[in-house]
Image (tube, grey):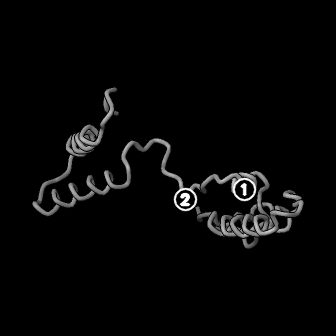
Amino acid sequence: MAPLAAPAFVLPSQHVEPYEEVQKRIQAAVTAIQARSDQYVNIAQVARNYEIPITRLRAGLQGRQSKQERQGANSKLSEDQELAVCQYLDRLDTIGTCARLQMVSSCANAILSSGHTSSDPAP
């Protein structure tokens, strides 16, 4: 049985733009709106002109960061702490030791507890 071939055309409703391109247009629209801060601006019309979702334009106007700029929701380590874990893994690789899950989690927990300053339990 032959594998299915990709369709020769894509319907306009099936076209998906890369996230980065839409985000660039959102930033351009936010800049344009902020430049006209003394005038009334129809946000829905601007969203149509830039061909972007109005909800994401409103979120950009309120200062919300894009998904690319935000830190993950389930991340407990800061960027510096993640870098320390990566350096630990590089060190293990240098000395020829295979990293095990328990070793990585112990390292991350040690970094979290050493960076914890309040009286409540460390994360």
Three-letter amino acid code of the residue under disc 1? Leu
Three-letter amino acid code of the residue under disc 2? Gln
Q: How many marks?
A: 2
**Residue at 77% across / 62% down in the picture?**
52
**Residue corresponding to mark 1:** 61
Judged from this view, the residue extending furthest toward the front is: 38
**Foreground of the two, 26 or 116:** 116
Query: What is the quadrant of residue 93 in the picture?
Result: bottom left
Tell me if I can see residue 119 in this picture: yes
**Residue at 62% across / 67% down in the picture?**
20
Judged from this view, the residue extending furthest toward the top is: 120
Left or right of 69 in this view: 102? left
Indicate which label's residue lies in the foreground, 1 or 2.
1
**Residue at 11% across / 60% down in the picture?**
96
Q: Which disc number belongs to residue 68?
A: 2
- Circle 1 crowding by C-alpha within 10 Å: few under 14, some 14–19, many from 20: some
Compared to residue 90, the image places residue 9 above or below, namely: below
Judged from this view, the residue extending furthest toward the bottom is: 8
Mark 1 to mark 2: distance in Å?
Answer: 17 Å
Image position, residue 9 (x, y; %): 76, 71
Image position, residue 55 (x, y; %): 76, 51
**Dot 1 or dot 2, earlier in sequence:** 1
- Contact between marks 1 and 2 (CB within 8 A): the answer is no
Query: What is the quadrant of residue 120 in the picture?
Result: top left
Left or right of 85 in this view: 59? right
User: Element under label 2?
Assistant: loop
**Residue at 26% across / 54% down in the picture?**
84
Image position, residue 59 (x, y; %): 70, 52
**Foreground of the two, 88 or 120:** 120
Image position, residue 69 (x, y; %): 54, 58
